[in-house]
Amino acid sequence: MENLDYIKLATAEAEKNLTSNEGGPFGAVIVKDNVIVGTGHNQVLLNNDPTCHAEIQAIRNACQNLGTYDLTDCILYTSCYPCPMCLSATIWANIKTIYYGNTAEDADKIGFRDDFMYQYLADKSINLLELKPLGRDITIKTFEKYQAKPDKKIY
C-alpha cells in the first residue's frame, strides 16, 4: 500500500462518525512495516471522554496489538492535523512520522478548537488556565523515591 492508501483508510475511520455520531469526523491508522497495527476514530461523545480522539484511540489500539508502549518505527496517518494533545501523545509513543489530511484551520472552520489551542500554546498571554504551584515539597518526595528505584523504567 502507498501513503495515500493509508490516508484513505484514516478517512474511512473518520467517516464512521457520519452515521454513528460517536464523536467528531476524525480517523487515524498506525502502520508498522507496511502492516496496519492500530486504528481509531473519535469516540468523545460515545465515552463522554474528551481524550478519546482518533489518534489517541489508534495509539491505544496499536500499543495493545503490539504489546508495547513504544511505537518506534510506526507511522501515524490521520485525517486531520493532530490537536496538541494528540501530537503530544504521538511524541510520547515515539512515533516520528505523521501524515495528515485536513489542517487545524480546516477543523476550526467546522467548529473544532484545534487552531485556537495552538494559538494559546504559542501565546502564553492568553489567560485560558490558572496554573498554580502547590505542595512541591510534598510531591517531590515521590519523584525522589522513583529516581532511587533500581528497577525503574523511563519512557
Image (cartoon, rainbow, N blue to C red):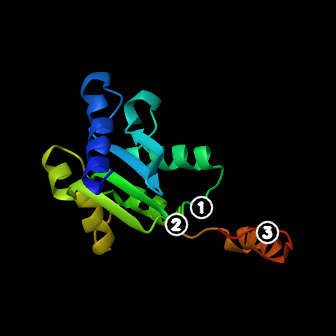
**Residue 28: image x %, image y %?**
37, 46
**Residue 65: image x %, image y %?**
59, 44
Instruction: Measure the C-alpha gap from mark 3 to mark 1.
Output: 16 Å
Residue drawn at (33%, 33%) of the image:
23
Residue drawn at (61%, 44%) of the image:
64
Instruction: Measure the C-alpha gap from mark 3 to mark 2.
Output: 19 Å
Q: Is residue 34 above or below residue 137?
A: above
Dots 2 and 1: beta carbons under 8 Å? yes
Residue 14: quarter of image: top left
| Neighbours of disc 1 within 10 Å: few (<14), some (14-19), many (20+) | some
Q: What type is the residue that disc 3 sits on?
A: Lys
Sequence order check: which comes first, mark 2 or mark 1? 1
Instruction: Write down the residue under mark 2.
Output: 94
Q: What type is the residue that disc 1 sits on?
A: Asp
Instruction: Write down the residue under mark 3.
Output: 152
Sequence order check: which comes first, mark 3 or mark 2? 2
For residue 101, side relative to residue 142 (left or right): left
Q: Secondary structure at mark 1?
A: loop
Q: What type is the residue that disc 2 sits on?
A: Asn
Q: Secondary structure at mark 2?
A: loop
Which one is in front, 16 or 43?
Answer: 16
**Residue 69: image x %, image y %?**
62, 57
Q: State the residue lying farthest toward the front.
A: 1
Sequence order check: which comes first, mark 3 or mark 1? 1
Disc 3 versus disc 1: nearer the observer: 1
